Image: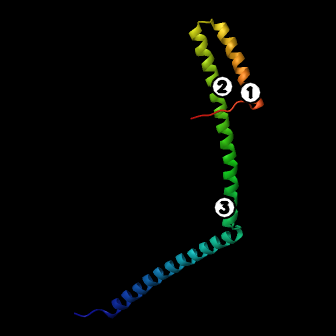
Amino acid sequence: MSVHPTSNKCFKRKLQRRNREVYLKLRSNLLQRVTDLEHHLEIRERVAMISWKDIAQELQMEVASLTVMNQTLRTQVKQYATILGALSSVIETECISGINEDQVASQCTAELIGVMCEYATGLVDVQLA
C-alpha cells in the first residue's frame, strides 16, 4: 500500500500552517502579557512608596489619639454611673420614707444639681468595679 505523494505534502502543509497559527497566537498572547506588565510597572513607578517607618509613626499617633478618646469615654461613663447611683439612692430613700412624688422629684433635681456641681469643681472621685 503506497501513500500518494501529494497527500503527504498536503498533510505537511496543513501541519505547518496549524503550527504557525499556534505559534502566532502564543506570540501574540506573550506580547500582550509583556505590554500589561510594562503598564503595571509604569503605574508602580508613578505611585510614591511610603516608608514602613512613616506608616508605623502614623499608627502610633492614631493609637495615642484613640487612647485619649477611650480615657475620656471611660471618665464619662464613671460620671454617668455616679449620677445614676445618686439618683437611685434618692429615689429609694424617698420611696421607703413614703414622701409624695413632687417631693421626690424636687429632691432628685436638687441631688442631680449637687452632683453636677461637684463634678464641675472636681470634688467627686468615682470608683467603678
Q: Which amino acid does label 2 sit on?
A: Ile
State the mark number for residue 118: 1
Vertical placement of residue 1 versus 62, above or below: below
Left or right? Give the position of 20 relative to 129: left
Q: Read off the residue under disc 3.
A: 56
Q: Distance between the residues labelled 1 and 2?
A: 11 Å
Judge by depth and name the residue closer to the eye, 60 or 80: 80
Colour logic: rainbow
> In percent of the image, x 37 and y 91: which residue is there?
9
Name the foreground residue: 72 vs 118. 118
Q: Is mark 2 on a helix, strand or loop?
A: helix
Does 20 sit above or below residue 75? below
Q: Residue 107, relative to residue 2: is it above or below?
A: above
**Quarter of the view holding residue 36:** bottom right
The residue under label 2 is: 83
Q: What element carries label 3?
A: helix
Please name the residue shown 69% across and 45% down the image.
Answer: 68
